[in-house]
Image: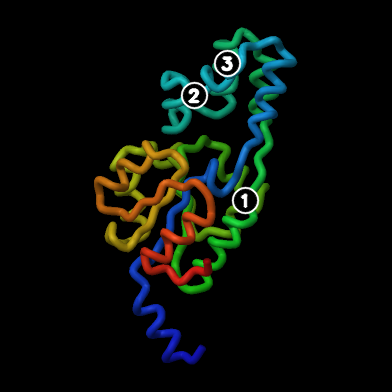
Amino acid sequence: MTDAASGAWHAEIMIRAVVFDLDGVLRHFDPAHVAAIEEQHGLPDGSVHRAAFAPELLDPVVTGRTSRAAWVRSVGEQLGNPRAAEEWGRHPSVPDAGMLALSDELRAVGIRTAILTNGTDTIPAELRESGIDRHVDAVFNSAEIGLAKPDVRAFQHVLHALVLPPHEVFFTDDSVSKLAGADALGIRTHHYAGITGLRAALRLAGAPVSG
């Protein structure tokens, strides 16, 4: 492609940044791991996640008011089984190679990519260890900014940091409810249900990605 052609191609791009959710999009957790812990410790099915994601335990850790270690201890107290909670807290994740390749593809054509996650204080270390941080330009962690999705202010923080208007930003999340704040600001959104649908949505938004 000539420089002139490349310039024309970039001039047609309608979005300047793509922001990804982390869990369930750029990395995945095996649900069988949690089920095995519950079975081993004689806990009811789903009890670990019910305890961990109850708002009274989850909200403080994802807004930086408590640490991940303290959160795991609280989960153990709720379960009456600290050991099971500790094992759950070591739950390994697997980066999504296809999604990371997509992020690299976007960056190669001049579109910045970022993560916006409702995360904990250990997210920076987790991203370094997994290598995910090498595939994005920025990471916005709710535990660091003190605001969690779908709070409109979390997305305003992202727009301010990227120095972009809402219509030039694209956000995808595997949870429909987390899109609300972005939608309210006029950010282009997509409910992530797989890479094929995401690629199609990105093309509709003007991103020159392959099919």
Work out whether 171 lies above or below 32: below
* CA distance separating discs 1 and 2: 23 Å
Residue type at tag 2: Phe
Compared with 57, 161 (above or below) is below
Who's the residue at 52% across and 19% down the image?
50
Q: Dot 3, how many residues are within 10 Å of its Cα: few (below 14), some (14-19), or many (20+)?
A: some
Compared to 126, does 59 lie above or below? above
Locate residue 203, reporting x and y percent: 42, 66
Q: Whole-percent x and y of residue 198? A: 47, 56
Q: Is residue 201 left or right of residue 76?
A: left
The kind of residue on which mark 1 rests is Asp
Which residue was labeled with disc 2?
53
Of 143 and 117, the residue lying toward us: 117
**How busy is the neighbourhood of tag 2: few (under 14 within 10 Å), some, or many (20 plus)?**
few
Q: Nearer the viewer, mark 2 or mark 3?
A: 3
Closer to the chain start, of discs 1 and 3, is 3
Residue 96's disc is 1
Dot label at residue 47: 3
Q: Counting residues from the N terminus, which is met first, the one under dot 2 or under dot 3?
A: 3
Q: Residue 33: where, in percent of width, then height?
A: 69, 28
Calculate the distance from the C-alpha at mark 1 to the C-alpha at mark 3: 27 Å
Q: Check disc 3 and give the amino acid type.
A: Ser
The quadrant in which residue 4 appears is bottom left
> Which residue is at the front of the view, 173 or 111?
173
